[in-house]
Image (cartoon, rainbow, N blue to C red):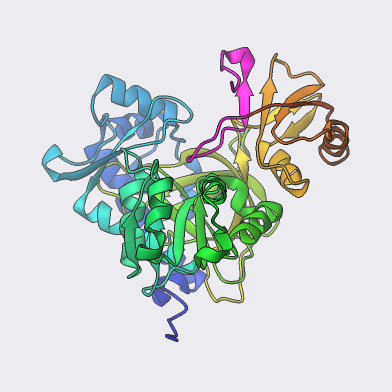
Amino acid sequence: MTTWARYFDERIETMPPAWTRRLEEERLAEQVARGYERSPFYRRKLEDAGIRPENVERLEDLAQLPFTTKEELRVSQAESPPYGDFVCVDGIEIVRVHLSSGTTGKPLVTPYTERDVATSAEVGARAFWAAGVRPDDTVLHCLSYSFYTGGLSDHAALEATGAAMIPVGLGQSARLLELWRDLRPTALFSTITYPLHLAETAAERGLDPRALGLAKLVVTGEPGGQIASTRRRLEELWGADVGDTYGLSDVWGTLAGECEERGGLHFSGQGATLVELVEPESGEQIPVAEGARGELVFTHLYREAAPLIRFRSRDIAEVIGVECPCGRTGFRFRVLGRSDDMFRVRGVNVFPSAVEELMRELGVDRFAILLEAFPVEPPVRILVEGVNGRERELAQAVRARLDFTCEIAAAALPRSESKSKRLYRIYEGEEPPA
């Protein structure tokens, strides 16, 4: 059996914090100056804030820079199509274009230069290597390749680890199972939802997922990878080790991955991206320290085509630790959910991921939360598939764990190979699941 190195890039992944800081400050100054010189969007933002780019030299200077929001970027692209006036290169330099997933509105058009493509692969490969992908793996890539960053960009990052890649995409589950023994995959990369769907499809064909020989499940796109009950469910179904990863279409396809300690996601974007924690409502910085919670904010340090400066992700994260037995110096975190998915029931803040954690513990894979009016008043209606007469038990568990009252209703919920939609804001016109 081959013994592989612990790290994809030991120098950068184990770099002492003081060295990392020096690299980040050098590249931050360069990136801000470049944005000011080449982008009308960033020139306006800096001038409106009374900031000269030459005054941004230290990480402490970051707090004076204005935030960038997805809404601003959408307006920029609507007024200056296709890339917006935040783009910092000429069109001839762009070699690839992706779209964001569009789950929170109109998709953003994201251009890449040749160097951007290489940086994306490098950052992602560090994360995938941490999560367990190795050159002797044959990986089924089961995310959509249609426009989406997680398709080709994550494929390239996985390929950079040396693994053999099989571009499956979505909509091929039956065909994949037919070809399984010919392909002999050792790993699968997908959302949390897909291996659950594929296991059901296999069972319908008389196949035991555990007998298919899959050794690794590398997951992304949903917070369930950091939920113990969800992880156990996948491991029991497939008899495979689960490694979680994280990324954003707007920043890098993948920029964090779990190491073998399985104690949170290691940030893997050193030298390419700065990350901050801020208080979601006030925007005040929160020190990155064990136990800290806040919204993740990203600043590109090494991005040519469409750099982002203090981009608000709307992802709420908790820092698990800043050191790890594996030796990586990228801090460890878990994503709790999106701030725009969180809802409040009489003063109690609730993330759909918290409901998922409880439901998985109780053996429920499919559920949907319906918010029928604003402000949200109890009981909150939750549709559950396979409730089997346990409505009262589930409702009591939600009340005891999450401190709000709900009404559990049995329902047949739609199947999906991509991300599972957990929350429906009926009062905003969203159609409930049929």
Spot occupied by residue 159 in the image (x, y as percentages of width and height): 32, 63
Q: Is residue 141 above or below residue 212?
A: above
For the C terminus, give its image quadrant: top right
- Would you say 335 lies left or right of 12 here? right
Quick check: 289 above or below 169?
Answer: below
Q: Main secondary structure of the magenta part?
A: loop
Residue 173 forms part of the magenta stretch: no
Residue drawn at 62 percent across, 20 percent down: 425
Residue 115: x %, y % from top left: 23, 55
Instruction: Point out the residue furthest to the left here.
Output: 92
Q: Position of residue 276 (x, y in %)?
A: 53, 49
**Which corner quadrant of the image does residue 269 belong to?**
bottom left
Viewer-nearest residue: 323 or 50? 323
Assign the N terminus to one quadrant of the image. bottom left
Q: Is residue 369 above or below residue 286?
A: above
The magenta stretch is 413-434
- 384 left or right of 434? right
Q: Quadrant of residue 157?
A: bottom left
Inspect this view and state whether residue 122 appears: no
Residue at x-position 59% and y-position 46%:
223
Q: Nearer the viewer, residue 103 or 268?
A: 103
Identify which residue, 125 or 380, lies in the foreground: 380
Q: Is residue 69 left or right of residue 361?
A: left
Residue drawn at x 40%, y 70% as measured from the top left: 137
430 falls in the magenta region: yes
Is there any visible trace of residue 291 in the rendered image? yes
Count the marks. 0
Residue lying at the far front of the rendered structure: 206
Q: Position of residue 181 (x, y in %)?
A: 40, 64
